[in-house]
Image (tube, helix red, strand yellow):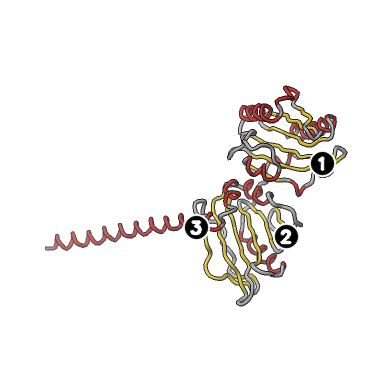
Amino acid sequence: MPAGRDFLSFLWIFLGLVCFQAHGLLQAGAEQKGGGMAGPGLPEQVGQWRLEGQEESYNPETLFDYMDGAAELYLAYNFRSLKTARYSKGEGPRIVVELYEMASSEDAFGIFSFEREDKEVGVGQGSEMGGGILRFWKGRYFANLYGEEEVPETSILALGKALEALIQEQGRPPQLLALLPEPSQGLEPKSVRFFRNHVCLNQRFFIANKNILLLGPETGGVLALFSGPWGRVHLVMVQYPSQEKAGAAEASFRSAYMAEAGQKGRLRTEDGRWTGAVREGDIWVGVFGARSEEDLAEILDMVLGRIGKR
């Protein structure tokens, strides 16, 4: 019988370990389904504004449950997870806080830049406040805060600063930004957008229905407006993983967009404006809307000069 008791003891210990491991696996699965993420949490309280209820978490598979219409945009910037919660002072309107974790700081900057248009307010590594909405990026994170009804902007800003303090990391903006000409040379800083695919590019500046620039997860591009003696033009700059892929994109663009230009790489469009494209190593550059061929050449030379100094 002692041997029987030893067997029963072993059996109970074994079953206990199995149940413990199963619980851990189920819990991990639940966190994955809900989008639980490591990294900074959300503030418990800022002034009189307290966290209401529990945080909600979402991952790439469940993001559509939170935002059916805009999820594609975030996924295009390599979205990883979302934490969101509401804050209240008891009765009255709530403040919604959304903290998005992206795959990289470039992606966090990209989603921030996509709709940038309001004044900078000094939160994170880049921010804007307008219409009761605070948006900022820092490290791999992008934050969006707003009142469900009219809320003082000072309250939203205080909550945003408290959230920003919990994000310990600093990120690096896209390297392509350093290759853009300076504002003194005509750059409109708030017009700068970072993109990865042709859908995002087309929403801000339409080039073609098809992906003629061969954009994808491994590419990074910037779109910017320039004003000067040449009028107002669009600049598109894309960096590819290799010179070979940049060359393939250059050939694809010329074939689909400006076949009539031949090897010259410059074309007068139906509206009388000029479009030109060049490649320098792994970087492709396109200028759209110049008033003359001379203006086009001046802008391209200015951009190529910046690229040559990298």
Q: Amino acid at mark 1?
A: Arg
Give how far apart the Cα atoms at labels 2 and 3 are.
Answer: 28 Å
State which quadrant residue 263 falls in.
Answer: top right
Q: Which residue is mark 2?
A: 129
Disc 3: which residue = 36
Residue 228 appears at what percent x and percent y? 85, 41
Instruction: Give the quarter of the figure containing the N terminus.
Output: bottom left
Q: Amino acid at mark 3?
A: Gly
> Which residue appears at 65% of the width and 53% of the height?
138
178 lies left or right of 184: left
Q: Answer whether labels 3 and 1 touch (C-beta < 8 Å).
A: no
Identify residue type, mark 2: Met
Spot the residue most to the top: 263
Name the spot of residue 96 as percent of width and height, x first: 61, 65
- Asked whether the beta carbons under mark 2 and mark 1 sit within 8 Å of each other, the answer is no
Residue at 75 percent across and 31 percent down: it is 308
Which marked residue is nearer to the observer: mark 2 or mark 1?
Answer: 1
The x and y percentages for residue 77 are: 60, 47
Which label is found at residue 71? none
As measured in the structure, the alpha-carbon distance from the residue carrying label 2 to the one carrying label 1 is 26 Å
Disc nearer the start of the sequence (2/3): 3
The quadrant of the picture occupied by the C terminus is top right
Disc 1: which residue? 232
Q: Is residue 19 left or right of residue 37?
A: left
Tell me which residue sits at (88%, 39%) in the image.
Answer: 229
Secondary structure beneath disc 3? loop
